[in-house]
Image (cartoon, helix red, strand yellow):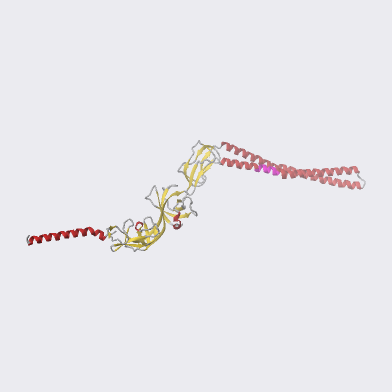
């Protein structure tokens, strides 16, 4: 073999060895340099912690209206969806019999009033005149008796005449007492009796008026009819609801968040809400009431919110979604919630890309939302953090797949 052939063979082997070494290095490099990982960047900015829950539009007052007596529906004064005013007649039952009873009670009051006037004027006047006449007769009998006594003492009158005068005096006294007793009876017992009869008749009249009023169903307040359960001609029973009405006034929302949110809630907090029917239209609300007790069956607490400018489409009992802002920061460090590990255990930590390695850091979190959390210690704005979904252990070599924007 020539020297030239040997040189060519050595060159081939050297080239082949170099290729093998290069290929092995290429295959081993990803494991040596570490996997490529997506990262998120800690941000600096404003942060708001919110509570999101669902609720309903709560009417200020709801009333089921029913008559207190049974009867046939004679007239209807309102329909579903109609606005009503306090005192407006919504329904009237057939009241012919009740009206007749009322007329009879009025007549009884008139008769009792006549009797009272008769006792006070005619009867009492006659009794007083009778007393006056009896008093005059008694005075005359006393004078006659005194005169005859003087005559009898002087021997000018007989004993029989004196006795007759005494008998006349006694009779006059008896007549006066009888007249006075009659006057007392008329001004006392008979007067009281006639007055009592009048009061009784007036009470019966008031009861008749009340029974007549029971045949009318009126609106207790300004509002809207949301349900009518009767038709003209129906026979209804006492106490059976005929209308359901809600009060007209300020719109209020009611929600029942979990009791674990109680410490975060406060009267005056701002919120935004939207209805399921119009989810893209959001409107403002304010917390006005937090119940003093927790519902023990569901572990929730009732919260009410006022809506200063309610949309026209809101209806009682409409389902709404409410987001309450419970805390705010003007500027703080923020990470996606899925970048913080150990949140559920109460020992949060993160993996930060430090050079070419994943570095573990314990962090302290502040406010939290549905998708983001505030980190008050352990990371600076701009640092790159590996999400919890990436399977990387602390200390592993890593390469950033792409710099996040």
Residue 7 in the figure: left or right of residue 183: left
Residue at the top extreme?
A: 233
Residue at the left extreme?
A: 2
Residue 3 in the figure: left or right of residue 360: left
- Which stretch is magenta? 191-199
**Quadrant location of the C terminus in the rendered image:** bottom left
Q: Is residue 52 magenta?
A: no
**Quadrant location of the N terminus in the rendered image:** bottom left
Q: Quadrant of residue 112?
A: top right
Q: Give 102 or 6, whichever is nearer the viewer.
A: 6
Q: Give 306 or 360, whichever is nearer the viewer.
A: 360
Could you tell me which residue is drawn at 18 percent across and 58 percent down? Answer: 20
Q: Give 342 or 32, whichever is nearer the viewer.
A: 32
Tell me if I can see residue 184 in this picture.
Answer: yes
Tell me if I can see residue 120 in this picture.
Answer: no
Q: Is residue 226 above or below residue 3?
A: above
Residue at the front extreme?
A: 1
Q: Is residue 82 above or below residue 402?
A: above
Residue 205 in the figure: left or right of residue 178: left
User: How many discs appear?
Assistant: 0
Q: Position of residue 347 (x, y in %)?
A: 39, 60
Q: Main secondary structure of the magenta part?
A: helix
Q: Is residue 127 above or below residue 46?
A: above
Could you tell me which residue is drawn at 41 percent across and 59 percent down? Answer: 327
Q: Position of residue 10 (x, y in %)?
A: 12, 61
Q: Position of residue 69 (x, y in %)?
A: 55, 39
Residue 170 in the figure: left or right of residue 206: right
Q: Position of residue 72 (x, y in %)?
A: 53, 36
């Amino acid at each position: 073999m020539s020297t030239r052939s040997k040189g060519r063979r050595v060159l081939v082997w050297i080239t082949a060895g170099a290729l093998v070494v290069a290929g092995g290095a290429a295959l081993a490099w990803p494991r040596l340099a570490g996997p490529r990982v997506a990262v998120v960047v800690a941000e600096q900015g404003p942060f708001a912690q919110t509570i999101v829950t669902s609720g309903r539009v709560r009417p200020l007052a709801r009333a089921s209206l029913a008559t207190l007596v049974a009867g046939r529906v004679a007239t209807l004064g309102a329909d579903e969806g109609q606005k009503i005013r306090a005192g407006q007649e919504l329904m009237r039952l057939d009241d012919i019999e009740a009206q007749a009873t009322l007329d009879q009670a009025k007549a009884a009051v008139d008769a009792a009033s006549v009797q009272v006037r008769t006792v006070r004027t005619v009867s009492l006047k006659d009794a007083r005149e009778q007393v006056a006449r009896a008093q005059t007769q008694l005075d005359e009998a006393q004078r006659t008796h005194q005169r005859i006594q003087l005559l009898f003492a002087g021997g000018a009158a007989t004993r029989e005449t004196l006795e007759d005068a005494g008998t006349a005096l006694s009779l006059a006294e008896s007549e006066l007492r009888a007249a006075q007793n009659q006057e007392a009876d008329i001004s006392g017992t008979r007067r009281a009796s006639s007055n009592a009869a009048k009061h009784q008749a007036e009470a019966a009249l008031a009861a008749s008026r009340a029974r007549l009023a029971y045949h009318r169903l009126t609106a207790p307040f300004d509002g809207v009819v949301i349900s009518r359960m009767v038709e003209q001609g129906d026979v209804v029973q006492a106490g059976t609801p005929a209308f359901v009405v809600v009060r007209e006034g300020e719109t209020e929302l009611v929600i029942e968040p979990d009791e674990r949110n109680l410490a975060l809630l406060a009267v005056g907090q701002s919120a935004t809400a939207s209805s399921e029917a119009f989810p893209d239209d959001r409107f403002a609300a304010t917390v006005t009431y937090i119940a003093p007790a927790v519902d023990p069956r569901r572990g929730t607490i009732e919260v009410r919110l006022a809506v200063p400018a309610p949309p026209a489409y809101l209806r009682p009992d409409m389902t709404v979604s409410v987001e309450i802002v419970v805390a705010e920061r003007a500027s703080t460090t923020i990470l996606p919630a899925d970048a913080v590990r150990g949140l559920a255990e109460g020992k949060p930590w993160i993996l930060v890309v430090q050079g070419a390695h994943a570095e573990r850091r314990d962090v302290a979190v502040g406010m939290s939302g549905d998708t983001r959390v505030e980190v008050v210690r352990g990371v600076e704005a701009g640092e790159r953090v590996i999400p919890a979904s990436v399977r990387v252990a602390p200390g592993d070599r890593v390469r950033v797949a792409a710099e996040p924007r």
